[in-house]
Image (tube, grey):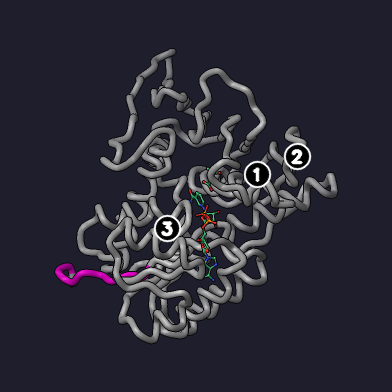
Amino acid sequence: NASTVLRGALVGCGFFAANQMRAWQELPGVAIAALCDRDAGRLAAFGDTFGIEHRFDDIETLLTQMAVDFVDIAAPTPAHETLVTAAAHYGVDIICQKPFAGSLATARRLINICRKHGVSLTVHENFRWQHAVRRVAELIGEGRIGRPFFGRISYRSGFDVFANQPYLATLERFIIQDLGIHTLDMARALFGDVVRLSCETGRVNPDIAGEDHATLMLRHEAGCVSVVDCSYATTLADDPFPQSLIEVDGDRGSIRLAADFQLTIHGPGGSATVEDVTPTWPAWSEAPWNVIQESVVALQGDWIERRRAREPAPTAGPDNFNTLALVEAAYQSAATGQSVEPERW
Ligand code: NAD
Ligand code: 89V
């Protein structure tokens, strides 16, 4: 029923949750009725900032006392199993942040638990929702450049991500798990599922635990070969954080997405059409995070429509399983020096 307001609970009130909260507040037909965080200080500060009165330090109490239609889990990966299982048992729909579940086995189990309880599970995989990325997908879908045979998704930056997210410096698996997961998901969204992958990684920054650059080559089932490269160790005067630069070559033309949001479509006979794909920024957004914040509004807005139509979201559990499988395959390939055939849902 389009006139009913969907009631949600936001679980995990940390750095990124503020973006999800602002997006829910901007979107019609939805309201965050309750908050949950096990850190009392964060819970209080977040509740006061966003004017949410009902606050809980554990999800079971929240779900017992509040009638909600969905939970939006912005807590980190180690909390997913407990939180998703609890929400499924209470029969509420679930949105959960990436990287989902922590392992393929746990992801499979949680997806099946949600199925058993008849609740929808959507992973908050937002990068493919960026305005410019959606335009590239649309052009490919329309056949504007024919059949893609090569793609490149490149994310290179020296932005200090550790300032806002200090936990990133402690992860044994860093850039592929945190950021590469987004670029791999974009590769799947643009070129389809992957049958073979190889990966090389390295670390430049001596003060962090994990790898901070990775270069991957993917063979997609539909025939395209793509290169996905990411780095947080790249010094650039004009740092594009957090944008991804995209190249696609098709048998009837090519697409180039540049850092200034100029998208060029190269056609037969040397023709070139330039589109300005600068997004309409949310009023509350701020550079450089606006690229990501805009995609959060797009993902959550789509989720509301799908929820009303009872349709699975594009980044529903089984879809995201195939992105997670690429992350696992990437680490396996980097460790063994062999190419890997990723698992598939
Ligand atoms: P954070 O540490 O700032 O916040 C996480 C919050 O979750 C903390 O307040 C913590 O107390 C709370 N929490 C942990 N376990 C909980 C539990 N069992 N119940 C209730 N609350 C619990 O982390 P963050 O930077 O906000 O990242 C959160 C998640 O968002 C991560 O998975 C991260 O990868 C993801 N993230 C996604 C994007 C994106 O663009 N999609 C960007 C940044 C972060
Ligand atoms: O989007 C993310 O997952 C963030 C960042 C852009 C910093 O990598 O953690």
Residue 251 or residue 255, whichever sits in front? 255
Residue 337 or residue 233, whichever sits in front? 233
Q: In which quarter of the image is the C terminus?
A: bottom right
Q: Is residue 264 among what the camera can see?
A: yes
Q: Name the residue under label 3.
A: 314
Relative to 56, is 184 above or below?
above
Magenta segment boundaries in residue numbering: 2-9
**Structural distance between the alpha carbons of marks 1 and 3:** 24 Å
Q: Mark 2 points at which residue?
A: 201
Mark earlier in primary sequence (1, 2): 1
Q: Name the residue under label 1.
A: 175
- Name the kind of residue labelled 3 in the image: Pro
Report helix, strand or loop for mark 3. Answer: loop
Q: Is residue 218 left or right of residue 182?
A: right
- Name the kind of residue labelled 1 in the image: Ile
**Structural distance between the alpha carbons of marks 2 and 3:** 29 Å
Q: Do the residues labelled 2 and 3 touch (CB within 8 Å)?
A: no
Q: Residues within 10 Å of mark 2 (few under 14, many from 20)?
A: many
- Name the kind of residue labelled 2 in the image: Thr
Residue 98 or residue 160, whichever sits in front? 160
- Of tags 2 and 3, the one toward the viewer is 2
- Residue at the extreme left: 3
